[in-house]
Amino acid sequence: MEITIFESVVIESALSELEAEGVKYDGLYVDMNNAPERKYVKDKASLIATLKKKVERVRIDATKSYKAEVEKQAFAIHERLDAANSNFQVLIDEYNIERKKILDAEKARKQAILDAAQFDLDHEIGLLINKTYEFDKAEELRKQEELRHNMKVEAERQAAERQKQLNEKQEQDKINAENARLTNVEHVRGVNRAILDVLEENDIGTGVAMKVIKLAAKGLLPQLTINY
């Protein structure tokens, strides 16, 4: 099919050359990791894409006057260009797929490293939290035990203090009682001495007077008491 309408964009010989170039790469191994080879493939694909855009532009512009023929020729050119580009596009697609696999694998590797680091960090934090909890628990138990011990010591101290005060009071009471007893003995003796003196002054013998005083002190003389 002639493509005279689009000769301003691409001529038959150039189109045939591109088709032949594309056929060369059918089943041909190309190292897409090699920059020059990858550039050559991409340049060819880019050239074909540019030609397709120009053909499309001419098709649109020429459609009004050559609609049917334009559409027919444009379709034919697109088919031939797509066929010419198919092997290049396959190489590019395969390269992109391979690159994606490599990039995905690298991303997964880095993510695995980050996940492992995060796991270790979480583990360390967990251990630290457990240690802190155990320490706080032990510290609380220690404080409670210390408080109970201090309360026991204080209770024992207070009990000892109360016992000491009680002992001191009992001792003082004994002293006071003894002092009172001694004081009372002297008082009784003084009263008895005064009565004895009076009886003796009234010619009552000492022996009889003392007997009377003893009987009166014991309450054995009716109607007679001694007020000490």
Image: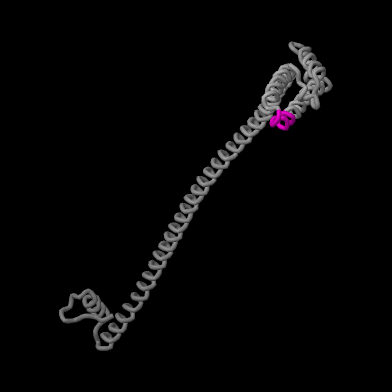
Q: Main secondary structure of the magenta part?
A: helix
Looking at the image, which residue sits at the far right?
A: 36
Which quadrant of the structure image shows residue 26?
top right
Q: Check if residue 62 falls in the magenta segment.
A: yes
Q: From the viewer's perspective, is 104 left or right of 163?
A: right
Residue reaching furthest to the left: 222
Which image quadrant for residue 20? top right
User: Which residue sits at x=21%, y=80%?
Assistant: 225
Viewer-proximal residue among 216 and 209: 216
Q: Return the residue nearer the eye: 51 or 145.
A: 51
The quarter of the image holding the C terminus is bottom left
Q: Position of residue 107 (x, y in %)?
A: 68, 28
Q: Can you give x and y, in whole percent of width and height, for residue 142 in the image?
A: 52, 46
Q: Residue 26 vs residue 139: left or right?
A: right
Q: Which of these two is toward me, 69 or 199?
A: 69
Residue 63 visible in the displayed image: yes
The residue lying at 28 percent from left, 82 percent from top is 196
Residue 149 on image: x %, y %: 49, 50
Q: Which residues are magenta?
A: 56-65
Q: Residue furthest bottom?
A: 202
Q: Position of residue 99 (x, y in %)?
A: 72, 23
| Quadrant the N terminus occupies | top right
Q: Residue at x 72, y 18 (%)?
A: 80
Q: Compared to 60, does 170 lie above or below?
A: below
Kindly tell me whether residue 90 is visible in this rendering: no
